[in-house]
Image (spheres, rainbow, N blue to C red):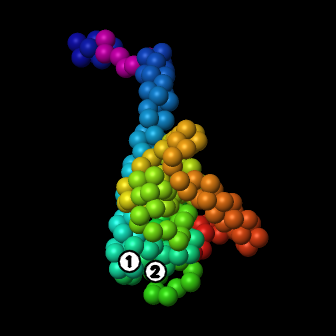
Amino acid sequence: MSAMRRADRRGFTFIELMTVWAIITILAAILFPVFARAREKSRQVTCLTNLVNIGAALKMYGYEHFGHLPPTDNDLRPLVTRYIYDPEVLLCPSARREKGRLDIPEGNPDLVSDYVYRGGLCDDDHPTQTIVADEIATLHNDGGNYLFLDGHAKWMSAGSLSEHPEIEGVTELDALRREEDRASEADSYSPEGPRL
């Protein structure tokens, strides 16, 4: 009798296994892009938080310097160690580089940042409409994060800046970005980003 029970019991057929495998493959193909977008969205939020922290540091610097922000384009060195304690704030998590903590001693001329800074502004230069800093490249879901003079930061799609003529600083930041690209092409390529 026990031999007869073993013969009645059977495993999965090849067709059943292939069907399950096909369903799992289709689900994976659907879900992987969703997970990738979710991961990029979290990086976008981290980058936005970094820009808000840079904005707070710029505000503190401005309070101590009678409303004037650091005067030199792409020079955030006056903020490091006094207003920004963690130099990782200057790095966008979506930029491709080897991860690791940056130890930047005070006065280091080779400060690395992934953000383009527009210097020489005052805190009363149309604060809600003037872009102070943004990312070097449009990295986040076909758009980029922008820091405004009043300290708020927001994500904007790549084409939306041209739809808002009231926003100041876009052409200046584009010129700084092109200048930075020319300088980086003239120098050797650095995967760490521009030197400030």
Label 1 belongs to which residue? 66
Q: Does residue 12 belong to the magenta stretch?
A: yes
* Badge number at residue 78: 2
Residue 162: tell me if it is visible. Answer: yes
Which residue does the image show at 53% across and 76% down from the upper left? 71
Query: Is residue 16 found left or right of 143 in the rendered image?
Result: left
Q: Secondary structure at mark 2?
A: helix
Q: Does residue 136 belong to the magenta stretch?
A: no
Q: Residue 166 in the image: x percent, y percent?
A: 51, 46
Q: What is the distance, in whole Å, between disc 1 and disc 2 at their CAs? A: 15 Å
Q: Secondary structure at mark 1?
A: loop
Q: Which residues are magenta?
A: 8-13
The residue lying toward the viewer, choosing from 126 and 187, is: 126
Q: Quadrant of residue 191?
A: bottom right
The residue lying toward the viewer, choosing from 35 and 154, is: 154
* Badge number at residue 150: none
Mark 2 neighbour density, 10 Å: few (under 14) some (14–19) many (20 or more): some
Q: Residue 64 in the image: x percent, y percent?
A: 35, 80
Kindly report which numbered mark, 1 or 2, lies closer to the viewer in this rendering: 1
Quadrant position of the C terminus in the picture: bottom right
Q: Residue 85 in the image: x percent, y percent?
A: 36, 77
Which residue does the image show at 60% across and 74% down from the upper left? 195
In the rendered image, the residue lying farthest to the left is 1
